[in-house]
Amino acid sequence: MADREFDLVLYGATGFVGALTARYLAEAAPPGARIALAGRSQDKLDKVRTGLGAVAQEWPLLVVDATDEQTLKGMAARTRVVVTTVGPYLRYGLPLVRACAEAGTHYADLTGEPVFVRDCIDQFQNAAYATGAKIVNSCGFDSIPSDLSAYRLYRRSVEDNTGELTDTTLVAWIKGGFSGGTIDSARAMMETVAEDPAKGSVLAHPYSLSPDKTMDPDVGRQSDQALQRASSIDPSLDGWVTTFIMANHNAKIVRRSNGLLGWVYGKNFRYREVMGVGSSTAAPLLAAGIAGGIVATMAAGALVSRFGAGRRILDRVLPKPGTGPDEKARRTGWFTMKTFARTTSGARYVCTFAGSGDPGYQATSVMLGEAGLCLAFDELPDVAGILTPAAAMGDALTERLRHAGMTIEVATPPLLE
């Protein structure tokens, strides 16, 4: 790809997260990086570029529509990497993945839609492998902290020669908001399953993104539904944990990474994710309310999405794509993820992955931006196909995110009597 016109094209630069990612790239890209901004509207692209400062004023603008496969192919052929924020990916993403896979162009997205990832695997794995394209899904808060945390735990267990990973649980504490785009992605998944109920199994099965079904570990039932004391996960924790809304997707990505890396995490690797809700007297009630509310909301959404009238009601009442937390909320948000693991020798580890800024937007723009730069400029494992962040760029991306100010470290948790 040395003769490509661009190192990186950011597609969806006028959207909510796209504009944040463009701002980050203007600050973080190395001198001389050949970056272009792409989207449907020339005027909106020009407005975004104008707000990025002097360094970006020479960045080319590409008018590209997600429904026009020829312009998508043209964009993919001109660049080494496409970074896309154009979702819901189930509605708009597959033609771009096809274009990148066939052109041998590396690709990164923000999807939290397991059905979309499964479609990418089924439709484009062979093409991407043949051309050498790294198609990397879920390069934001979905699912880089989860994926890299499990990967770092594996790397530490190898360094210490403490055996394979076994029971592994991520506990998330977050302060952040939701955008209209995130809600629209959830709607797209519910509508897809309503139209094709067979795809519901992708959401339900823990190994639905597995690269080789015959190698799936037989470790019994795995579920991310939770309502329990945090100390049951590790004695160093206080308070309560509950169901984490992102766990269903993140856990599948982590398990796929294990498979893509040759099941090196362990043949008895059991993984789940939960969310901490504190230790106040109200915490058990809050935990129960969240756990029950997630199940009820998903069930109600799936039912309403079956009917045209229900979809029209959702159109009127839900936030619109392109909206999200204001600047103060993005600046004051934060996240801390602690992943507790045991190994076959009895060793215990905890990986802390933490950062400042609203996790789904401010921090996600950093993760996505660094993933794109990593694909464009770093020496990476010689793998291709439909990949995960850990499988495609685990070590290099870890160092980039540390340099960007995020905490990613593995330690031995304290033993409490």
Image (cartoon, grey):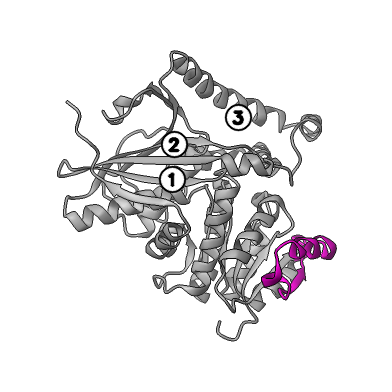
Which dot marks residue 354?
1
Q: Position of residue 158 (x, y in %)?
A: 22, 56
Which residue is located at x 44 percent, y 48 percent? Answer: 145
What amino acid is at disc 2?
A: Ala
Which residue is located at x 80 percent, y 29 percent? Answer: 313
Disc 2 to disc 1, C-alpha distance:
10 Å
Q: Position of residue 196 (x, y in %)?
A: 64, 41
Which residue is located at x 67 percent, y 40 percent? Answer: 325
User: Can residue 76 be seen from the camera position used here?
Assistant: yes
Under circle 3, the secondary element is: helix
Mark 2 or mark 3, earlier in chain: 2
- Which of discs 1 and 3 lies nearer the camera? The answer is 1
Disc 1 to disc 3, C-alpha distance:
28 Å
Mark 2 or mark 1, earlier in chain: 2
Quarter of the rendering containing residue 7: bottom right
Q: Say above or below: 96 vs 192.
A: below
Magenta-colored span: 40-68
Under circle 2, the secondary element is: strand
Please check the rendered image and state whether residue 63 is part of the magenta-colored stretch, yes or no: yes
Quarter of the rendering containing residue 227: top left
User: Can residue 196 be seen from the camera position used here?
Assistant: no
- Which of discs 2 and 3 lies nearer the camera? The answer is 2
Direction from residue 121 to residue 268 in the image, left or right: left
Which dot marks residue 306?
none
Find disc 3 in the rendering and name its residue: 298
Q: Position of residue 168 (x, y in %)?
A: 31, 40
Q: Badge 1: few (under 14), some or many (20 or more) residues near its Cα, within 10 Å?
A: many
- Work out which residue is located at the far right of the displayed protein and give it: 43
| Rendered-image quadrant of the N terminus | bottom right
Find disc 2 in the rendering and name its residue: 172
Q: Badge 3: few (under 14), some or many (20 or more) residues near its Cα, within 10 Å?
A: some
